[in-house]
Image (spheres, rainbow, N blue to C red):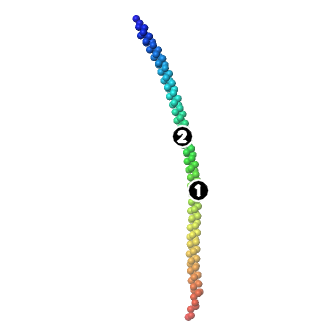
Amino acid sequence: MHDPPGDIITVVLAVISAIGGQQAWAYYQRRLEVRKAAAGESREDRRTDAALYRDDLRARVDELSELLKQSTQKHDASQASREGLLEQMGELRSEVAALSVKVEHLEHENEDLRLRLAAHEEPPTNG
């Protein structure tokens, strides 16, 4: 006939399996939820890190843009100063050339005057 202890063992094993399966299912659900939460936090951390990195890059770009602007202004000012100095140098060269010509004319005139003076100072010849 029936073996009652065998049936009881089968039923007990079925109940234990059902309870164990249910607990295993709950365990895996909790584990999945924890992983999702951790993944969500890490995504948020990555987003935060990316936002900080982006903001830092924007600040650096702004700083470099300002430095470039200042450098350009200084270069423009020095270029204008350089052009002014070159113009002054050209004017000074012209003045030096004009003065050189005047000195040359004055030297010739001085020589002519010395010759005239020497001719007037010569004693009259007795002859």
The spot of residue 64 in percent (x, y) is: 55, 48
Q: From this view, report whether residue 68 is shown above or below residue 30.
A: below
Considering every residue shown, the one lying at the far bottom of the view is 127
Considering every residue shown, the one lying at the far top of the view is 1
- Write the residue at 53% across / 32% down: 41
**Residue 125 vs residue 37, the one in the foreground:** 37
**Residue 120 vs residue 12, the one in the foreground:** 12
Q: From this view, report whether residue 57 is shown above or below residue 70.
A: above
Three-letter code for the amino acid on which mark 2 is drawn:
Tyr
Q: Quadrant of residue 90?
A: bottom right
Three-letter code for the amino acid on which mark 1 is drawn:
Ala
Considering every residue shown, the one lying at the far left of the view is 1
Q: Residues within 10 Å of mark 1 (few under 14, many from 20)?
A: few
The spot of residue 59 in percent (x, y) is: 56, 44
- Write the residue at 52% across / 29% down: 37
Please state which of the two labelled residues, at mark 2 or mark 1, is closer to the viewer: 2
Answer left or right for 8 relative to 78.
Answer: left
**Badge number at residue 77:** 1
| Quadrant showing the C terminus | bottom right
Q: Secondary structure at mark 2?
A: helix
**Residue 123 vs residue 98, the one in the foreground:** 123
Q: From this view, report whether residue 61 is shown above or below residue 40.
A: below
The spot of residue 42 in percent (x, y) is: 52, 33
Q: Residues within 10 Å of mark 2 (few under 14, many from 20)?
A: few
Name the residue that disc number 2 marks. 53
- Write the residue at 55% across / 36% down: 48
Mark 2 or mark 1: whose residue is earlier in sequence: 2
Q: Secondary structure at mark 1?
A: helix
Gap in Å between the C-alphas at discs 2 and 1?
Answer: 36 Å
